[in-house]
Amino acid sequence: MGTAGTISESALRELLDAAVRGKEIAAQFFQSLASAVEDPQLRRCLRRLAQEEWDHRKILLKHRRELFGRNEAVRPARGADRAPVFAPLARKPVIGTVDDLRLALRTAIRTEQEAHRFFAEASRTFDDRAVKVFLRILAEEGLAQVDHLREALTLVDAGLPMARRRRVAVARAFGN
């Protein structure tokens, strides 16, 4: 797979290294969330998200090895600075309330949306069709994760009868 685009081979390597690190960060974030919730359905959803991120990481590593050889190791991670798109997920979430969980899920949604934009934009910087397609697939994976995260947010909201009653009361107050 050539890299005869407007970005050098080292830039592609750095992009893949950042993506690998980002997937690690996201997987750890979702696993932390899963550990913090009691609802079995929500826990399964969050564990599935974590597993998908680890699976995406494995795919990235495989493609990286194909491009740069088996002996070329992923450059050492230096935290979120190696994956700036995923920086909001780099700190372990502290979930003490339902609102904390909602905030964490919304942060993850925004982060996955940003990852989608990042990889979609990166795909436009390469002339090599295979690289473009690969980066577009990464972008679409971000949107799929957004759908799963919205599902998790729906589960959080569904498990809170007080929240539903408040929404109904607000709707009645405004005549909706």
Image: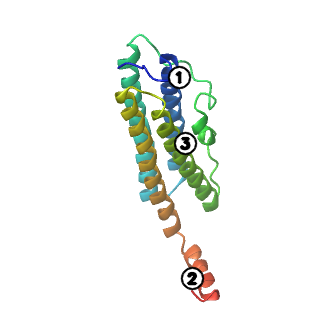
Earlier in the chain: of badge 3 and badge 1, it is: 1
Earlier in the chain: of badge 2 and badge 3, it is: 3
In the picture, residue 163 is in which quadrant? bottom right
**Residue at numbered disc 2:** 168
Picture residue at 43% right of the left edge, 32% below the top? 57
Q: Nearer the viewer, mark 3 or mark 1?
A: 1
How far across and down, in percent of the image, does residue 137 sit? Answer: 38, 39
Mark 1 lies on a secondary structure that is helix
Q: Quadrant of the C terminus?
A: bottom right
In the picture, residue 173 is in which quadrant? bottom right
Q: Nearer the viewer, mark 1 or mark 2?
A: 1
Three-letter amino acid code of the residue under disc 2: Val
How far across and down, in percent of the image, does residue 101 sit? Answer: 59, 56
**Residue at numbered disc 3:** 29
Query: Foreground residue, 13 or 102?
Result: 13
Side of 155 relative to 99 (left or right): left
Query: Foreground residue, 122 or 44?
Result: 122
Mark 3 lies on a secondary structure that is helix
Q: Nearer the viewer, mark 2 or mark 3?
A: 2
Q: How packed is label 3: few (under 14 Cα within 10 Å), some, or many (20 or more)? A: many
Three-letter amino acid code of the residue under disc 1: Glu
Q: Quadrant of the N terminus?
A: top left
**What's the mark number on residue 98?**
none
**CB under 8 Å between callouts 3 and 1?**
no
How far across and down, in percent of the image, does residue 169 sit? Answer: 61, 84
Mark 2 lies on a secondary structure that is helix
Picture residue at 42% right of the left edge, 58% below the top? 41
Side of 173 relative to 51 (left or right): right
**Residue at numbered disc 1:** 14
- Spatial CA span between label 2 and label 3: 33 Å
